[in-house]
Image (cartoon, rainbow, N blue to C red):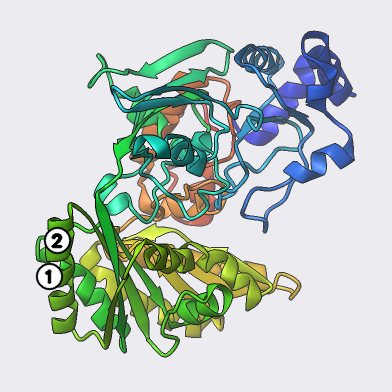
Amino acid sequence: MAHADLAASTEQALGGAPRKQQLIERLTAELPADIVLHADEDLRPFECDGLSAYRQVPMIVVLPSTIAQVQTTMRICHANDVPVVARGAGTGLSGGALPLDDGVLLSLAKFNRILDIDTDNRRATVQPGVRNLAISEAVSHLGLYYAPDPSSQIACSIGGNVAENSGGVHCLKYGLTTHNIVQIEIVTVEGERLTIGSSALDSPGFDLLALMTGSEGLLGVIVEVTVKLLAKPELARVALVAFDDVRKAGDAVAAIIQAGIVPAGLEMLDNPAIVATEEFVHAGYPKDAAAILLCEVDGTEAEVEEDIERVREVVEREGATEVRISRDDAERALFWAGRKAAFPAMGRISPDYYCMDGTIPRKALAEVLIGIGELSEEYGQRVANVFHAGDGNLHPLILYDANQEGELERTEAFGGAICRLCLEHGGSITGEHGVGVEKIDQMCVQFPSAELTQFHAVKEAFDPKGLLNPGKAVPTLHRCAEFGAMHVHNGELPHPELERL
């Protein structure tokens, strides 16, 4: 269902104008009045997520604190054909939590409790508003931690991590969110509560847990998550490796993996990112390097000592100009502090930045980085590269000034070109940030009409009316045709019987 059609049906369901007031009355009749926000000054804080280039004030915000309140909100919205956008901490970088001017924004911020810690099975059950880092902090005294660690882990919430299938600097060895959760509870668009997954090693039927992870709020509202906990490694050390050439650094990444070493983390920063980060954090990064790698190995003391020396041998063979090994946990933490502060560091050198998120095979790292440099010259915009080198997840940061007319549009075009570059080298348009609204046109490039049609069919199975986060992640086939990435035969799209988002 197109968003315009959805808006029309919403007005009809609520009996016409003023539909906002009617919806407020229906919500406050069954929910506490103080959790239903509708005054402009109360709505403004929710107008965007971490991708602040796109903004929209929602019609209404609901701030539930119980699952029953979420169910009530969903039932009322479903009965009245009102679209709903679920929001976590608002740290997403693809516009996935961008509100609708004719819809409800459902904030899960009050769902911030750790419900259970099961040390025997190394599990923790948490509400979706719990911060990523808070899980590890809560179990640290038990010698445990939660592995996925996005750079925003101090602020991002676990529900959003599941919705976007977030990773982090240690995802190379320990996996993404989908590899570190075992069960979730969701509220469906109709207000029904469902358990997906199992606390056991496997669950019967289709693997709906994997389907829900990374579904960007299109299939249900996450209200509870059971995560895996890991034992802290005995020892971890980081090698900070400098190169005088980006190609050498890219080749070294592939060489480390080829040598049979599985780092806990393997990150890369190019010179613009190094300089900005070092001036912001003072992590000891060599500002004259063309690129640096941060390679962490963990395990027993004997394993770490052996692997870190093997890393040194590999990178020196690949042309490293400097290799510095962390002497203790404090220095190790400082090395990582620089990497995790790389995004905010850009705020010191540019009024705005646009963070892309593509993936490529490791062997293509050097070629793609060189290609991004060529695109930077073509579009006349600076770019800094910070990324998870070990798994080929790029995060080019395009620097721009939104106050300059036309710069945002040129930046969007630059970002689209980077996505196409990733596809040309056998990659994907996103690794962990999601599609949201940012890369929805590039979905038309990555997927043919038959696959997009199947995505719509999955969406329809969970949400026939198309009320959950409409206009995000999966483009309509008409949109792809207008974008010039799909041919429409005789004025008709494939499978016309399917309702379109």
**Image location (x, y in percent) of residue 16:** 85, 20
Q: Earlier in the sequence, mark 1 or mark 2?
A: 2
Residue beneath disc 2: 261
Residue 211, percent from left and from top: 36, 30
**Residue at x 43%, y 82% (from the top left corner):** 271
> Which quarter of the image is occupied by the C terminus?
top right
Type of amino acid under label 2: Ile
- Cβ atoms under marks 1 and 2 closer than 8 Å: yes
Which mark identifies residue 214? none
**Where does the image place residue 5, in percent across and percent down from the top left?**
67, 30
**Looking at the image, which residue is at 25% across and 14% down?**
204
Secondary structure under the numbered disc 1 in the rendered image: helix
Disc 1: CA contacts within 10 A as few (<14), some (14-19) or many (>=20): some
Which amino acid type is shown beneath numbered disc 1? Arg
User: Is 26 positioned to the left or the right of 478 in the image?
Assistant: right
The local crowd at label 2, few if under 14, some if 14 to 19, many if 20 or more residues have their Cα within 10 Å, is: some
Residue picked out by circle 1: 310
